[in-house]
């Protein structure tokens, strides 16, 4: 049985070439198993990169998506969305996750795939930079890479074949993220789990011949996945009364 039936439609040479890390479409497909949002929901894809995940959210779930990224060019992403027949469902914007300029309560959900660990490790980040733009009862949902406990104290040699200690500091474990998310005054943690997506999403990435994938091969081929995994997180914004609204 195929664990990623929706992702099969995106397994083309063109779309594979646009990946910027372990297969984000498969990560997102698994991540969406943890939530239910109706078609037409307003969703921010935070750290959307070149737009693959935004395309998937729009076409597979019928969301109205804001593709927000600091490093990609909105015009290029918007042209890609139009070419893929989703230009009316997605708006590409340039946005700094640490200083976003969205409207209060604009989104039903903020979703982030393999990006949140770059900007969300400050315990104040969620309350200060994300929750103001999520409606009460809305969701923040993300997938990030994780490392087994103790890896930062004694870094396994295979990891150092591709990444420096400074780069590995962005990758933390499940208890680290539990502490970060539990510090929120405006949200409650609904899900925090280790994902099944790991080897397969890495295999898809390492098949590419761009310099970043080639560099990552050294660690993965040396056995780095013994210590690495992906985490899924779902948090819900509390109402002003301190209760999570809605049951979706």
Image (cartoon, rainbow, N blue to C red):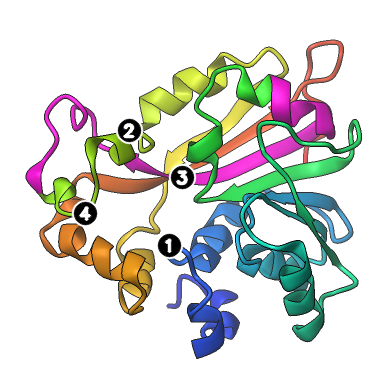
Please report whichever mark, 4 or 2, sits nearer to the chain's N-terminal start.
4
Q: Which residue is mark 3?
A: 144
Q: Residues within 10 Å of mark 2 (few under 14, many from 20)?
A: some
Q: Residues within 10 Å of mark 1 (few under 14, many from 20)?
A: some
Q: Along the line of sight, which residue is nearer the eye, 107 or 103?
A: 103
Q: Which residue is mark 4?
A: 162
Say left or right for 162 vs 36.
left
Q: Which residue is mark 2?
A: 169
- Callout 2: SS: loop
Q: Is residue 46 magenta?
A: no
Residue 32: percent from left, percent from top: 62, 55
**Residue drawn 62% across the image and 50% down it:** 47
**How far is disc 4 from disc 2 in space, using C-alphas?**
13 Å
Circles 3, 2 touching at the beta carbon (< 8 Å): no
Q: Along the line of sight, which residue is nearer the eye, 175 or 166?
A: 166
Say left or right for 22 vs 248.
left
Q: Which residue is mark 1?
A: 21
Please report whichever mark, 3 or 4, sits nearer to the chain's N-terminal start.
3
**Residue drawn 16% across the image and 62% down it:** 218
Which residues are drawn in magenta?
128-157
Residue 147: percent from left, percent from top: 28, 38
Tag nearer the camera, 3 or 4: 4
């Amino acid at each position: 049985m195929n664990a990623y039936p929706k992702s099969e439609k995106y397994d083309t040479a063109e779309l594979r070439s646009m990946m910027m890390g372990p297969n984000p479409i498969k990560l997102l497909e698994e991540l969406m198993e943890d939530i239910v949002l109706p078609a037409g929901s307003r969703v921010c894809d935070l750290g959307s990169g070149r737009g693959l995940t935004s395309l998937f959210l729009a076409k597979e779930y019928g969301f109205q998506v804001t593709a927000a990224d600091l490093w990609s060019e909105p015009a290029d992403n918007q042209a890609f969305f139009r070419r893929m027949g989703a230009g009316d469902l997605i708006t590409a914007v340039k946005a700094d996750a640490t200083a976003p300029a969205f409207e209060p309560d604009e989104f039903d959900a903020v979703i982030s795939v393999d990006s949140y660990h770059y900007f969300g490790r400050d315990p104040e980040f969620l309350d200060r930079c994300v929750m103001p733009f999520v409606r009460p009862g809305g969701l923040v949902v993300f997938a990030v890479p994780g490392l087994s406990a103790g890896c930062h104290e004694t870094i396994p040699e295979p990891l150092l074949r591709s990444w420096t200690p400074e780069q590995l500091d962005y990758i933390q474990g499940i208890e680290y993220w539990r502490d970060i998310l539990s510090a929120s005054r405006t949200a409650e943690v609904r899900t925090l789990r280790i994902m099944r997506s790991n080897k397969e999403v890495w295999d898809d990435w390492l098949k590419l011949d761009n310099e970043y994938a080639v560099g990552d091969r050294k660690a993965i081929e040396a056995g780095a996945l013994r210590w690495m995994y992906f985490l899924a997180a779902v948090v819900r914004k509390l109402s002003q009364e301190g209760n999570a609204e809605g049951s979706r």
